[in-house]
Image (cartoon, rainbow, N blue to C red):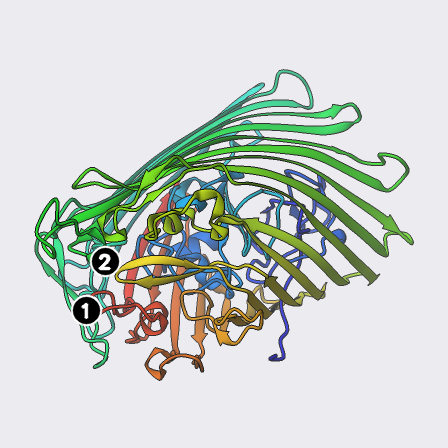
Amino acid sequence: MRPYLLLGAASTALTFAPAYAQDKAQPTDALQATEKSEEVDSKNTIIVSATRTPTPITAIPNTVKIIGREEMETQLAVSASLLDSLSFSIPSLAPARQKLTSTGESLRGRTPLYMVDSIPQSTPLRDGKRSGFTIDPAFVERVEVIYGANAIQGVGATGGVINYVTVDAPKTGEWLNRITAEITTDDFEENGFHYRVAGVAGRKLGAFDFVGGAAYEKHDLFFDGNDRPIAVDTIQGELMDSHSLALFGKAGFEPAPGQRIEGTVNFFEVTGEGDYTTVLGNRDAGVPATSVPGTPAGDPTFTEAFNAALSYSHDSLLGGDLTLQGYYFDFYALYGGDTFPVFQDPAIAPAGTLFDQSALSSEKYGAKLTWVRKDALWNGLQLALGADYLRDRSFQELAQTDRLWVPELIYHGWAPFVQLEQALAGEVVRLSGGARWENATLEVPDFTTIASANSTFVEGGEPSFDEVLFNAGIVLKPMDGFTLFGSYAQGFTMPDAGLILRSVSTPGQSVEELVDLQPVIADNVEVGTGWRGGGLDLTASYFWSNSDLGSRIQVVGGAGQVRRERTEIEGLEIAASYKLGSGHRLGASFAALDGRFDSDGDDIVDRELDGRNIAPDRLNAFVEGPIAGPLSGRVQASRLFDRTFESNDPKFNFDGYTLVDLILRYETEKAGDFSLAVSNLLDEQYITYFSQTVTFVSDRDFVSGRGRAVTLRWQGSF
């Protein structure tokens, strides 16, 4: 066990508290506690509109991170995507791959649940690793990150929750008009220019309000620190050599005081253009793969996602707040192909010659009901009751030969829950606790695997499970500004059922008998402390996360396979920021993780998790503030420390690196705001964490990270 400290501020394992900062001076680089409040009593107060259990700032026994719009825009100026932009803000999130995939990206060493307005975007039945790419950042007002396993949003959050909260119309009756245009160049290299334009407009008109928006983005190549074009990932998918289109709409109506009906739609598409092919690198020699003009085999990769939701709220029903949400999510992703051994079928083409590429389809709909009452049975007791329903239908096909690689899987489950919170000793002590009863069934038809799995017949079935998941927490506030907290929570997800089923190669198997289809249940214990006052924001926390039957992906013959093993992860995060009287602010955050798994089935963890499953230790630091008049700036640095994996070949150890970014912003009254961002200011040449540490990385995807890039952005209103 390594000594750790963790930064934190708050959120219950079964309590989801979305928040947004109302003041630009509010610190956002430390993990922040949030509180449902209708009053602003100081310049730094955060106003929170809670979704499930409204919990005051002093009552939250967990860690949550709220990333406001301004911080989002700062990080988006130095990153290529919304998901990539989270890396600096969340040090325990594995380094972004700068690709159209979240493969290898974990939160606290486990899989996070991605959501848009609490609509699950993840595809756990066949994890396509694109769940973080379903909405354009122009439509996101803030990002809420709940750290650690929790079950409040149901299946998928063993590492935590990353929720994209969409923009609302102003409550004042004024217009929201936001137009953004930007151009990025990778150190002025030919074919290294990228363009983006987005617009959002909305207004409140009496009892009715609306928001609408559109965004378009086009990328060419990224270049590394040695001015080489980074290799396109023609298999998992790319941000390079692609264009994206996004549309968004939201409308609300308040039929009576305290009541609201709201509908939201979101469409997002990323399409590869297929203008480049990969030149293989040499992993053993440390030579990264690059790109050259050409046409990859097969069809270009793409992702298409559509969200729709309808909600109703009533703030005084039976003495409590009622929220009811129904949603629909449709997702389709096409991946690149090759003549992989797993695709071969002598009945179609001679062995070694058959080209194919896979596609994933996932469709889900569900409903969420929450009712919260304060002073429910006696003064100070808050009671939350609710229930969720989810139906998820997923399958994976081989698009070129019209074969079904993963059969149609249907998951349907429902889960009632109860959550209690009590303040004691004049709110010096707060206790919280609750339980969620998960009831789920996985329907799988009879099917036959493809030829590479011996065309094996598998008897279908409907394995089911029900499990009660608990949480409990305590918060102590011995003095103003100082808190101590501790919590226990359970979260669960399904193992990648598609990977398990498509790999069955032994005759006589049935779905009912496959132990690997049992759910992954993670137990999360966390303790922490925080201090806020006098311009100083300091938080620290330590966590343990264990799973008796975890899920680890291992790639064999070009295809992933699931390993069900005991896993144990622990970690520390610390964050601090300080605001000077001059208006300048400086801060730092640190995260360190350690994860191990049981490799030989003796129920003792004996090997370290590799880079696909655990992030490196990381230190982020920044300084920001006014420079002269309307000009302000920010310098930030991120140090990823070396990591040695004692159980693996030394060639998979990680050689750390340091990245420095510079952001300048110039605000005008009539002409809008201008910003100039330089990412990787020192043009550091490095190999990505994923490429260095993941044991199945080939010469094709052994790649450099992005070198220096300059972004000029204008944002205005009309």
Q: Amino acid at mark 1?
A: Ala
Q: Is residue 188 left or right of residue 606?
A: left
Spot occupied by residue 290 in the image (x, y as percentages of width and height): 17, 67
From mark 2 to mark 1, how far is it between C-alphas?
10 Å
Q: Please indicate, yes or no, whether residue 301 appears anywhere in the rendered image.
A: no
Residue shown at 19%/57% (left/top)?
340
- The kind of residue on which mark 2 rests is Asp
Badge 2: how crowded within 10 Å, few (<14), some, or many (20+)?
many
Point out the residue furthest to the top here.
255
Mark found first going from the N terminus, 2 or 1: 2
Describe the element under mark 2 as helix, strand or loop. Answer: loop
Residue at figure coordinates x 39%, y 67% from the top left: 662
Residue 369, image quadrant: top right
For the question of whether residue 451 can be seen, the reply is: yes
Res 117 label:
none
Tag on residue 233? 2
Q: Position of residue 511 (x, y in %)?
A: 44, 43
Please name whichever residue, 645 or 370, is drawn nearer the observer in this view of the structure: 645
Residue 518 location in percent, x, y?
A: 53, 49
Pick the front one: 423 or 624: 423
SS under mark 1: loop
**For the N terminus, which image quadrant?**
bottom right
Q: How many marks?
A: 2
Indicate whether 272 appears above or below 529: above
Q: Position of residue 470 (x, y in %)?
A: 70, 49
Depicted 421 relative to depicted 539: above or below: above
> Compared to 9, does 318 lie above or below?
above
At label 1, counting other C-alpha atoms closer than 10 Å, the crowd grade (few under 14, some 14-19, many 20 or more) is many
Answer whether labels 2 and 1 touch (C-beta < 8 Å).
Answer: no
Q: In the picture, which quadrant includes the C terminus?
A: top left
Residue, disc 1: 289
Instruction: Judge by depth and name the residue closer to the eye, 79 or 614.
Output: 614
